[in-house]
Amino acid sequence: MRAHVAVPRDHRAMALRALTVFFAISLPGVAHSQDNAGASCVIAASRETGSVYHTAALPGGSVLVSAEKGLYLARARDGQVALTAATGAKLAPVTSTHAIAGGMLIGAFNGLFVGQSSGRDASGALAVKAVPSDTEAVFALHDLPGAGVLIGAASGTFLAKGQAAAVTVTRVEGDTGRVFEMMPLSKNAVLIAAEKGWFVARSTNGKATLAPAGKADAGYARTTREVPGIGLLIEAQAGWFLAREQGGAVTVAAFGDATTGHVGSVGDLPNGRMLLHTEKGWFIGDSSGGKLAFTGVSGPDAPKVDRMVAVRDGLLFSSGPGWFVARDKDGKVTFTKVGSFETTNMAFHFHQLPGGAVLIGALKGLFVIRPSEADASLAKIEAPDTGYIFMMRELAGRRLLVGAQRDFFTAREENGKVVLTPVGNGVGDTGRLVDVPRYPGFLSHELPDGTVLFGAQKGLMAAVPKACLRQ
């Protein structure tokens, strides 16, 4: 089996690396629309914030914005975005937030804080104060039902209790070392990735307890998903891992077995089985009956598969030879090549339209595959010339917000065609912009009036629900 390479685990470095990645979608048969039905317009909500480090949706329809120039609450009404600077303690870049009674916990590189709105209706400024603790930098906050809020920090694992007006923090017994991230394992258990290995936290009589769960060197987790009756499947920097509980003990180990070797990519087929690309070839993973079984299948000679994306009747993926659609019908897996990988180069975002077409965003532009068609093929969208794509966000009304090198667009499907409307309104260069689920600091957020906020290197941006005033 291929050895797992140790991965540096500095969250500051990981956040910076995340900001250099571009993410994308694409669309076919493009037509330009000038109507204002379901219109959107992208504006610079504020350049005064400087670089945006972290955003978090808060109860009451506001968004917390941690940026170069400070901490703010953002609200929107009738297509207008208002920012209110937080008062009180000064925070380094925020890493995580968690709602508690009367306010919120805020984790930052300079410790743990609590925030409370100064208005009776949560419309006032956010007042921030430090919470006395020995956490040092805080990297993760996670609810532990029946006990409180777990704090993953530079100096270990802690537990916060109480309301915003009176929060107490205690150290959880057990030497985890620096905590990198936390993820739900079951209803009353949280899985912790830390400097000293993996741990599981549980609530026992109102207290948090820790138990070791192995030392698998997985690196930073990208995605997690439950395999019913089996455990938690983790896609990480070093490959795929499985956290499972047996006899009250939790273990984290490499996914696969001696037959598969190192597992590089996993996709969920429509019938519930899994397709695996491993160092020893292609396999089907079957978890029925609460047991895992792996069966080899014939597939394309692919040195590496970065990601497999579920589509209506199979899986879409790319590798060295090209783009493929894998289908599992009547127990037989087939692979259909639909295009060359060199055509797209790296792709990061995928979106399936109601008609079945899959939109692909890549460094070389916008592309589409219609995987359900017998003669499925990969096609580049030549006009308009978008350049590389760095953002995709689904909007109300089956529309997509597309951030591209040369403009922002909304895309929607009408009568089997995709209509693309420029909505940039001259906002210009945003700098680096990332909208990735595993990097919650850079997620976009939809506010009650339909405005979508997203942070960028050069300020806070917003897609507001109104037509652009052409400049």
Image (tube, rainbow, N blue to C red):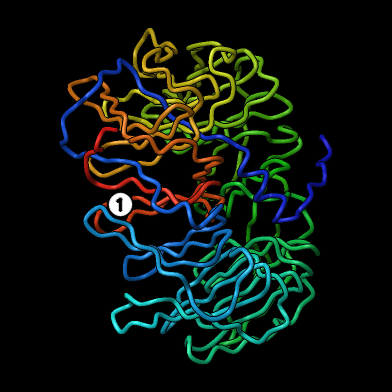
Q: Quadrant of residue 265?
A: top right
Secondary element under disc 1, as helix, strand or loop, is: loop
Q: Is residue 117 left or right of residue 215?
A: left
Q: Percent from the top left, x then y, of residue 435? A: 49, 45
Name the outermost residue toward the bottom: 166
Q: Foreground: 398 or 45?
A: 45
Q: Foreground: 454 or 411?
A: 454
Q: Quadrant of residue 69?
A: bottom right
Q: Percent from the top left, x then y, of residue 144? A: 54, 75
Q: Percent from the top left, x then y, of residue 19? A: 61, 43
Q: Residue at x 19, y 39 (%)?
A: 38
Q: Percent from the top left, x then y, of residue 49? A: 50, 57
- Kindly identify which residue carries mark 1: 451
Q: Amino acid at mark 1?
A: Thr
Quick check: 463 above or below 170?
above
Name the outermost residue toward the front: 471
How many labels were placed on the picture? 1
Quick check: 383 above or below 171?
above
Q: Residue at x 62, y 44 (%)?
A: 18
Q: Is residue 87 left or right of residue 402?
A: right
Q: Residue at x 76, y 54 (%)?
A: 9
Q: Is residue 342 left or right of residue 104?
A: right
Mark 1 neighbour class, 10 Å CA radius: few under 14, some 14 to 19, many 20 or more = many
Q: Quadrant of the C terminus?
A: top left
Q: Quadrant of the N terminus?
A: top right
Quick check: 42 above or below 422?
below
Quick check: 447 above or below 263?
below
